[in-house]
């Protein structure tokens, strides 16, 4: 992975499978699954209220989703990057939606079928902070960033 705002790859790598140790940690988390999923649902609902009140758009919910990640859709990449910088100034991690494989340097020149949807999401989508451990103080900081962004946007 190259150093970039998004996941950028210039050579093919490997996706190593999970080690026994990491599998054990994952199994231990299963006992907390309901609590984690409920916290993630609350995060998604928080962003829904924020978006609605500020005329911002979230990627629509899908039936049965687990709220792993909340994505905000903006008008263009300039707005996307501006919002990311505002969050960065408040020490809130965000990033663009994943760069489509057909746009990665390592796959330059490969045949592509479709791609318009993923290109659109990459150019204007922001993966918002969606951890189950977000606190009330975090929510306040996030809401302030969204307030400032919405005010600038008008």
Image: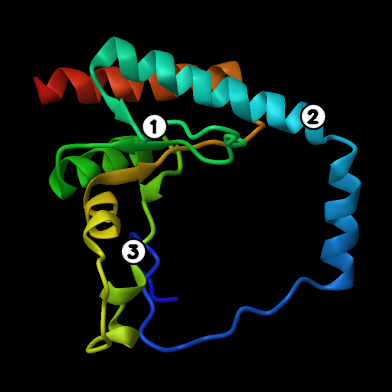
Label for residue 89? none
Which residue does the image show at 30% across and 10% down from the upper left?
53
Q: Nearer the viewer, mark 1 or mark 3?
A: 1
Direction top: furthest residue: 53
Q: Nearer the viewer, mark 1 or mark 2?
A: 1
Residue position for label 3: 99
Q: Secondary structure at mark 3?
A: loop
Is residue 107 in sight in this rendering? yes
Q: Secondary structure at mark 2?
A: helix
**Mark 1 packing: few (<14 Cα in 10 Å), some, or many (20+)?**
few
Quarter of image, res 32: top right
Q: Secondary structure at mark 1?
A: loop
Residue position for label 1: 60
Q: Which of the two labelled residues, at mark 3 and mark 2, occupies the earlier sequence position?
A: 2
Residue position for label 2: 34
Residue 8 in percent (x, y) is at 36, 72
Residue 152 in percent (x, y) is at 13, 23
Q: Which of the two labelled residues, at mark 1 and mark 2, occupies the earlier sequence position?
A: 2
Which residue does the image show at 28% across and 50% down from the upper left?
121
Which residue does the image show at 37% across and 16% down from the upper left?
50
**Mark 2 packing: few (<14 Cα in 10 Å), some, or many (20+)?**
few
Question: Is 21 on the left or on the right of 151, as rendered?
Answer: right
Give the position of the N terminus as an image quadrant. bottom left
Residue 58 in percent (x, y) is at 35, 30
Above or below for 56 versus 59: above
Which residue does the image show at 28% across and 82% down from the upper left?
105
């Amino acid at each position: 992975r190259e150093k970039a705002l998004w996941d950028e790859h210039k050579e093919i790598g490997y996706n190593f499978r999970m080690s026994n140790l990491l599998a054990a940690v994952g199994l231990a988390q299963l006992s907390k699954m309901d609590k984690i999923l409920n916290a993630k649902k609350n995060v998604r609902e928080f962003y829904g209220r924020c978006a609605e009140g500020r005329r911002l758009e979230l990627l629509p919910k899908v039936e049965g989703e687990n709220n792993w990640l909340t994505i905000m859709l903006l008008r263009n990449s300039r707005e996307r990057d501006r919002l990311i910088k505002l969050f960065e100034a408040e020490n809130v991690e965000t990033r663009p939606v994943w760069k489509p494989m057909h746009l990665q340097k390592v796959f330059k020149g490969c045949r592509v079928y479709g791609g318009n949807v993923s290109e659109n999401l990459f150019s204007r989508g922001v993966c918002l902070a969606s951890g189950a451990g977000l606190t009330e103080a975090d929510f306040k900081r996030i809401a302030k960033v969204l307030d400032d962004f919405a005010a600038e946007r008008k």
